[in-house]
Amino acid sequence: MIQIVDRSMLVPNIHLLTLEAPLVASKIQPGHFVIIKANEKGERIPLTVADWNREKGTVSCAFMQVGRSTRKLAALKMGDEVETFVGPLGKAIDINRFGTVACVGGCYGIGSIYPVARAIKSAGNRVVSLIEARSRFLLYWEEKIRQVSDALIVSTSDGSKGEKGHNSDRLREMLGEGQSIDLVVAIGCTFMMYAVSEATRSFGVKTIVSLNPIMVDGTGMCGACRVEVGGKTKFACVDGPDFDGHEVDWGLVLARRKAYIRHETVSEEAS
């Protein structure tokens, strides 16, 4: 059993759990994910890691409360234990000298993009971070991300803070103005990552996205997380979760994420 040493609600519906998991903390790298299960009969949920402390042996994950299983996670308190906490899983993101890198986060992805921006900045790159939310009260970790960025651009759908619109709008504007961006890394909801990939496609800027399809075992044995990238079937848990956004079959990803909506609705109503 893995103990929760800290937890908080970052903004409405987005929570942060910090767990004591020294073995996971000793190996985790930017881009890795973990699988967590709230209790014995709970669903195995993949979460991208938001932060870690190797000395203290802790790992933090940000997640959005959207259904029965994430509601169980959100109900946990400091001192509680989770049934399963497995990781690190997947492939770590490639950290190298690229030049100027746009690190893009939205929703729970704001937390997940932080360790990526930190590592890319430490590797000697210029980091421009872009974060978005529906409104200002749903933004978080702005100062934390600013500390590992050369520039931070904030967008809100309602225009209550920063620029009105979305990360994809800002990227399209920047590239259209001739600003040099050598790589884009985007983490967040599926539609945001799709929109970012479409915004950079015509400019030929490589765009890495972190896919979060349905997963079960996280080791490539069940095949539930299959996606199509570059015309080939891939498993997000072992081949990813990071892929070239310009090669992802987004229609398939979106369709497969909807496969269990009815079952999720029934489960939520029955709880």
Image: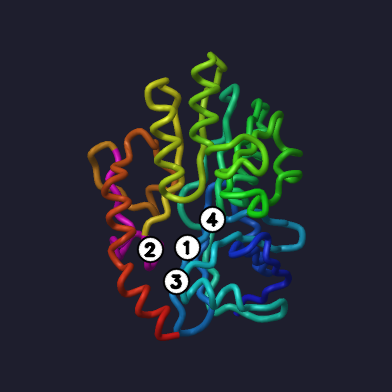
Q: Please tell me whether mark 4 sits on a helix, a strand or a loop.
A: strand
For residue 215, which numbered disc appears in the image? 2
Residue 259: percent from the left, percent from the top?
28, 63
State the residue position of label 1.
46
Label 2 sits on a secondary structure element that is loop
Give the camera-side residue of 186 and 20.
186
232 horizontally vs 22: left or right: left
Checking the image for residue 48, the label placed there is: 4
Magenta segment boundaries in residue numbering: 214-229
Name the amino acid type tagged 2: Met
Q: Regarding mark 1 in the picture, which secondary structure is present there?
A: strand
Query: At which x and y percent is residue 134?
Result: 56, 49
Name the residue rendered at 62%, 51% in the picture: 111
- Verify CB contact (< 8 Å) between mark 2 and mark 3: yes
Residue that numbered label 3 is attached to: 44
The residues tagged by marks 1 and 2 sit, at their Cα atoms, a distance apart of 7 Å
Q: Nearer the viewer, residue 157 or 168?
A: 157
Mark 1 / mark 2, whichever is N-terminal: 1
Question: Mark 2 or mark 3, which has the lower sequence index?
Answer: 3
Residue 226: say if magenta.
yes
Decide if residue 126 is on the left or right side of residue 246: right
Q: Do labels 1 and 2 touch, CB within 8 Å?
A: yes
Residue 93 horizontal side relative to residue 213, left or right:
right
3D distance between C-alphas at marks 2 and 3? 8 Å
Q: CA distance from mark 2 to mark 4?
A: 13 Å
Tell me the SS state at disc 3: loop
Give the mark nearer the N terminus: 2 vs 4.
4
Instruction: Please tell me how crowded label 4 is: few (under 14), some (14-19), or many (20+) other residues with Cα within 10 Å.
Output: many
Question: Looking at the picture, which amino acid does disc 3 mark?
Answer: Arg
